[in-house]
Amino acid sequence: MSQRQIIQVFEQYQKSRMQFVQTVADLASRPQNIEVLQNAGVISLLRPLMLDVVPSIQQTAALALGRLADSNDSLAEAVVKENILPQLVQSLASQNRFYKKAAAFVLRAVAKHSPELAQAVVDSGGVEALVLCLEEFDPGVKEAAAWALGCVARHNASLSQSVVDAGAAPLLVLCLLEPEMALKRIAASTLSDISKHTPELAQTVVDTGAIPHLAQMILSRDAKLKRQVFSALSQISKHSVSLAEMVIEAEIFPAAVACLRDPDEYVRKNVATLMREVVKHTPELSQVIVNYGGLAAVIDYLGDSHGNLQLPGIMMLGYVAAHNESLAMAVILSKGVPQLAICLCEESEQNTKAATVWSIGQIGRHSPEHARAVAAANLLPKLLELYMGASSSEELQAKSKKALKSILQICTHLPALEPLLYEAPSNILKHVVCQFSKVLPQDSKARRLFVTSGGLKKVQEIEAEPGSALQEYISAINSCFPEEIVRYYSPGYSEVLLERLENYQPA
């Protein structure tokens, strides 16, 4: 056999290897092929090709592995079991930028599925290798590495700490300064994933100088970047007063409030989330947001959004109102109660309803004036309906009950309370009757209306345990009226009158 023929054998072998990895990579990009590839033992066939002498075969094999691992967790586990990660990490330092991007994709695809698989990436030395890639010149390599680090960090505080300990945070902040938009987005997203777990991790990100750089980007025209920027600022703000103050001090308001009108719905949601995380800490931080026009902007936002997108805005109003009477009144004066009433009636998601009920409770619980604002929006029957509704979740029922009781205990707006006399169960009814027993002795006009509307008659029909609080309240109400009127509206009195009529002998 001639030299040429021998060389042709090797060329044919190389060509076949290349064709194989390219075909597998193409097949792996379509979900319907994954199971067939898995059953064919594709991972173990690709493994030796990761060490191929031809760089393009190595890169394509890594791309194929990444696509397979990305598709489901069992294939990602197979990549780990085949011991591919250590050799991948080992070759990261010496290979070209194309291979590095493909290798980072494999690490990302494995890490994203679960904390256990992310830990396998950490154990293989993958995090340190990825951090080195953040120092590469090529922005595509940096982007791939940052994305993979985010997939490790997002699972829990321990994994996030591994990313920080490897020195990722300052390099990610430097990535924010790069001109490439995709790299900025991924860097902001990964900083958000690191910050979300604990105050200490968030502080580490802050200490690298991240906040001023993130703050500069809130006016970017790129919606995807703004989503990530507001997400990162939210995750930093949520942990403590001092971290929230640092975000405020970066002078992101009132520009952030204006972003509640952004065309992108997820930018708007993340801004509302940021405001929620700031206001929840103290009355002073709430007042800062109120002073920037945050309440009116959030209420407008609720009018233009739906479902899960409403959740942070609804909770933001509740957190503001929870602090004190004046902030709760600010929510009322900004027309927050009618908007929450609309959310409650139109929304079908249980968790959104539960959050809305909670916020209504925070607004109405401060004083009779606050309770009246809630009652005037006809929300008390709605709260009762949700508390008693068979289709309501346990959380929704519990929150509805709590909100209803806290508002009823201070509500003096009797016309709104009266419908509850007919519908409320005994544990709620006693609070309703209690309020009538407090108000009626002081208000002659209310007493007259109570008789003509049928309220007094209804109270006489209530069956109360002798000596119970409910019985005491009923007695207090009855003492407000002449004895003959109370007797007239008592059950069975008409029969007594008829009996007297039958026994009456005219003179």
Image: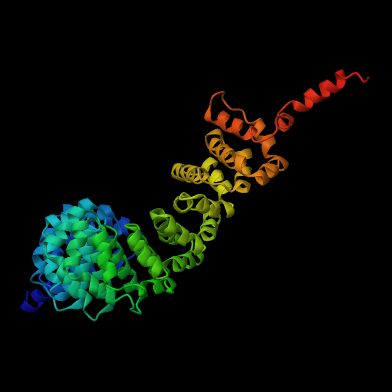
Residue 86 placed where, x, y %?
11, 59
- Can the viewer see residue 466 in this picture? yes
Q: Which residue is drawn at 45% across and 61% down?
A: 310
- Can the viewer see residue 19 in this picture? no
Q: Which residue is drawn at 39% across and 56% down?
A: 319
Q: In this view, does 358 lie above or below 24?
A: above
Furthest residue toward bottom: 179
Q: In this view, does 189 lie above or below 381?
A: below
Q: Residue at x 12, y 57 (%)?
A: 124
In the image, is 344 to the left or to the right of 419? left
Q: How is the image coloured?
A: rainbow
Q: Quadrant of the N terminus?
A: bottom left
Residue 153 placed where, x, y %?
21, 59
Residue 316 placed where, x, y %?
40, 59
Residue 289 placed where, x, y %?
37, 66
Say which of 343 and 419 sits in front: 419
